[in-house]
C-alpha cells in the first residue's frame, strides 16, 4: 500500500506565516539517490578535470541566466538580509574562480619519477576523488554555504549529495533548476530534503562529510562520522572578538565594528560578537557606536531598503533575547536596541549595544548570532589579548589600532583562523591561493577556497613499478641503500 509522503511547512521570515512546503525524504530515498550518484560518479571522474570544467562552464551559463531568480529565492528564505539578492551573482563569481583553480589543483599532485632510495623502482602518482561527498548546510547564507563544499568536490571528480537546511529550501530549489539544465552535472549532483534525521541518513551513505552549522550538531555529525570511520570537515560557530586600542581612530573603529556586528542581522558565523576597548577611550568609542547604531534602519517596509532584516529562523530571536536578559540580570546596561519587534509578522532587533559586560555572561561566551554588540573595557594590551583568547571558538578576530604594525603585533597573538587588521569582516578579501584554518570549537577542515579546496576531496595513490631485477629472498637490496650500520 502506498504511504503518503510527509511534508514540512516552511515559515516565511518576513510574514511569519508558513507559505511553502517541502516533502521530506526518507532514509530509503537517501540510499537510492546515493546509489545512483555513486554509479554516475565513475563516468564523471573518468571525464578528467578538463571535461568537468567544460560541463561546469555550461552550468555557470545556466546560473547566470537564473541569477536574479536565485537571489529572489534567497531573499525570501532569509528574509532579505542585505546581500541576499546578489547571491546568484556571488555564486557565479565563485564558480568562475574554481574553474581557474581546478587544473592547478591536479597539476601539483600528478607526477612520475624514479625512487630516490631504490633506483630501479619507478614511482607514479594516481589521484582519485572520494566517490560520494555528503554536504550538510545551515540556514544562514543558505546558497553560499551549500556550494562552498559541493562545488569544489564536483571539480575534484566526486558526486555530491546535499542536505540543505530545512529552514531555507527555496533557494536550493531555484539552484537545482539550473543544475537540471546540465544533464552531466545533474547525474552527479543531487539533494535531499529533511531535518537532522535526513542529515544522519546522508552520513550513513557518504565517503566523506562536509558540515556547516552549529557546535552541538557538529559534535553529533563528528560522532556519526567516527562510527563509520569516514573523514569530516566541520565549519562551526564563532564568538569573534574585536580589539580597539587606545591609538585607534575611534570613528573608523565604530564604523567597522558596527558593520561587522550587524551585517545580515548578525547571522554570520564570523560576525563581531564581542568588543574590547581600551579603558581610556571606552566612553568616547561607545558614544560614537551608539550614535551610528541608532541610524541603522530596519528593512521591514522594503527588503531592498534598510540594513537590518528579520531573523531568518524565529527561534534565533529567543536565543538572542536570552543572552540579552542574562547580561542585564548580571549587571550589563543596554544603551540602544534590546527588544525584539514584531513587524508584519517578521521578528526584528535593532543594533543592540551593551556595556558593563563580563565573561560570566552568555553574551560574551556563547554564539549570539544576532545584531548585538557587547563592549568591555580593558586596561592593557596583555589583558585585551587574554580576553580575546578566553573562548572555545577561533574563527576570526579583528584588531583596530593606530597603525597596521601595532594591529598586526596583536593579531599574531590571537587564536583564530582569519585576523582582520584595522577593519572587520575581511573574509572575502583572502587570496584564492591560500585559505586559513579554524581554531577550537569553530571546526576543522581544509580551506574552502583556492586549489586546496579541491584537493581535500582527492586521495593520492602511489604506483611503484620494479624496472630492474627482483631481489632474491637472500638479498637485502630490496631494503634500499646500505646505511653502513652494523648488521
Ligand atoms: P544547525 O547545526 O542547527 O543545522 C545545520 C544543518 O545540520 C541543517 O541542515 C540541519 O538540518 C542539519 N542537522 C541538524 N541535526 C543534525 C544531525 N543530528 N545530524 C546531521 N545533520 C543535522 O545549524 P544552523 O542553525 O542551521 O546554522 C547556524 C550555525 O551555523 C551557527 O552556529 C553558525 O555559526 C554556523 N555557521 C558556520 C559557518 C562556518 O563556515 N564556520 C558558516 C555559517 C554558519
Image (spheres, helix red, strand yellow):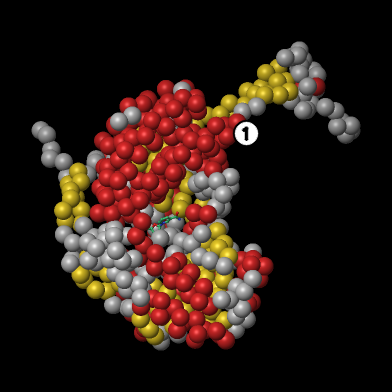
Res. 219 in view: no
Residue 36 as seen in the image, left or right of residue 363: left
Q: Residue reaching furthest front?
A: 305
Q: Give residue 177's position: percent from left, percent from top.
A: 27, 37
Which of these two is toward me, 60 or 186?
Answer: 60
Indicate which quadrant contains ligand 1.
bottom left
Residue 302 as seen in the image, left or right of residue 294: left
Q: Residue at x 26, y 42 (%)?
A: 173
Q: Residue reaching furthest top?
A: 469
Mark 1 lies on a secondary structure that is: loop
Q: Quadrant of the C terminus?
A: top right
Q: Is residue 78 above or below residue 378?
A: above
Q: Residue at x 32, y 47 (%)?
A: 164
- Mark 1, residue position: 108
Tally of numbered tags? 1
Q: Is residue 47 above or below residue 218?
A: above
Amino acid at each position: 500500500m502506498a504511504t503518503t509522503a510527509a511534508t514540512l511547512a516552511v515559515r516565511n521570515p518576513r510574514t511569519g506565516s508558513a507559505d511553502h512546503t517541502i516533502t521530506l525524504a526518507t532514509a530509503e530515498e537517501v540510499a537510492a539517490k546515493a546509489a545512483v550518484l555513486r554509479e554516475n560518479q565513475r563516468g564523471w571522474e573518468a571525464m578528467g578535470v578538463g571535461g568537468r570544467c567544460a560541463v561546469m562552464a555550461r552550468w555557470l551559463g545556466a546560473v547566470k541566466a537564473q541569477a536574479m531568480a536565485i537571489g529572489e529565492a534567497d531573499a525570501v528564505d532569509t528574509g532579505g538580509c542585505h546581500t541576499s539578492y546578489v547571491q546568484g551573482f556571488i555564486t557565479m563569481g565563485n564558480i568562475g574562480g574554481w574553474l581557474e583553480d581546478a587544473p592547478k589543483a591536479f597539476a601539483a599532485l600528478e607526477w612520475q619519477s624514479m625512487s630516490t632510495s631504490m633506483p630501479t623502482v619507478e614511482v607514479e602518482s594516481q589521484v582519485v576523488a572520494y566517490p560520494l561527498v555528503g554536504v550538510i548546510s545551515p540556514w544562514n547564507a543558505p546558497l553560499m554555504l551549500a556550494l562552498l563544499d559541493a562545488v569544489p568536490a564536483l571539480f575534484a571528480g566526486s558526486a555530491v549529495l546535499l542536505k540543505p537546511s530545512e529552514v531555507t529550501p527555496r533557494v536550493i530549489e531555484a539552484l537545482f533548476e539550473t543544475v537540471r539544465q546540465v544533464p552531466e552535472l545533474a547525474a552527479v549532483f543531487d539533494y535531499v530534503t529533511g531535518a537532522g534525521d535526513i542529515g544522519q541518513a546522508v552520513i550513513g551513505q557518504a565517503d566523506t562529510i562536509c558540515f556547516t552549522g552549529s557546535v552541538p550538531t557538529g559534535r553529533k555529525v563528528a560522532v556519526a562520522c567516527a562510527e563509520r570511520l569516514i573523514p569530516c570537515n566541520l565549519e562551526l560557530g564563532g564568538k569573534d572578538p574585536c580589539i580597539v586600542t587606545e591609538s585607534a581612530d575611534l570613528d573608523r573603529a565604530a564604523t567597522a565594528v558596527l558593520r561587522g556586528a550587524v551585517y545580515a542581522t548578525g547571522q554570520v558565523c564570523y560576525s563581531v560578537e564581542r568588543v574590547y576597548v581600551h579603558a581610556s577611550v571606552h566612553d568616547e568609542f561607545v558614544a560614537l557606536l551608539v550614535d551610528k547604531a541608532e541610524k541603522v534602519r530596519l528593512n521591514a517596509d522594503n527588503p531592498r531598503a534598510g540594513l537590518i532584516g528579520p531573523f531568518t529562523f524565529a527561534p534565533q530571536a529567543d536565543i538572542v533575547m536570552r543572552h540579552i536578559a542574562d547580561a542585564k540580570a548580571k549587571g550589563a546596561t543596554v544603551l540602544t536596541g534590546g527588544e525584539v519587534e514584531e513587524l508584519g509578522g517578521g521578528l526584528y532587533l535593532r543594533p543592540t549595544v551593551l556595556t558593563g559586560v563580563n565573561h560570566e555572561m552568555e553574551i560574551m561566551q556563547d554564539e549570539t548570532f544576532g545584531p548585538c554588540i557587547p563592549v568591555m573595557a580593558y586596561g592593557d594590551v596583555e589583558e585585551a589579548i587574554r580576553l580575546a583568547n578566553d573562548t572555545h571558538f577561533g574563527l576570526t578576530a579583528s584588531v583596530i589600532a593606530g597603525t597596521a604594525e601595532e594591529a598586526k603585533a596583536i593579531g599574531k597573538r590571537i587564536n583564530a583562523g582569519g585576523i582582520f587588521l584595522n577593519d572587520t569582516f575581511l573574509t572575502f578579501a583572502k587570496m584564492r591561493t591560500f585559505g586559513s584554518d579554524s581554531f577550537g570549537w569553530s571546526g576543522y577542515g581544509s580551506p574552502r577556497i583556492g586549489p586546496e579546496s579541491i584537493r581535500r576531496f582527492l586521495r593520492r595513490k602511489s604506483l611503484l613499478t620494479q624496472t630492474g631485477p627482483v631481489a632474491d629472498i637472500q638479498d637485502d637490496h630490496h631494503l634500499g641503500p646500505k646505511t653502513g650500520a652494523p648488521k
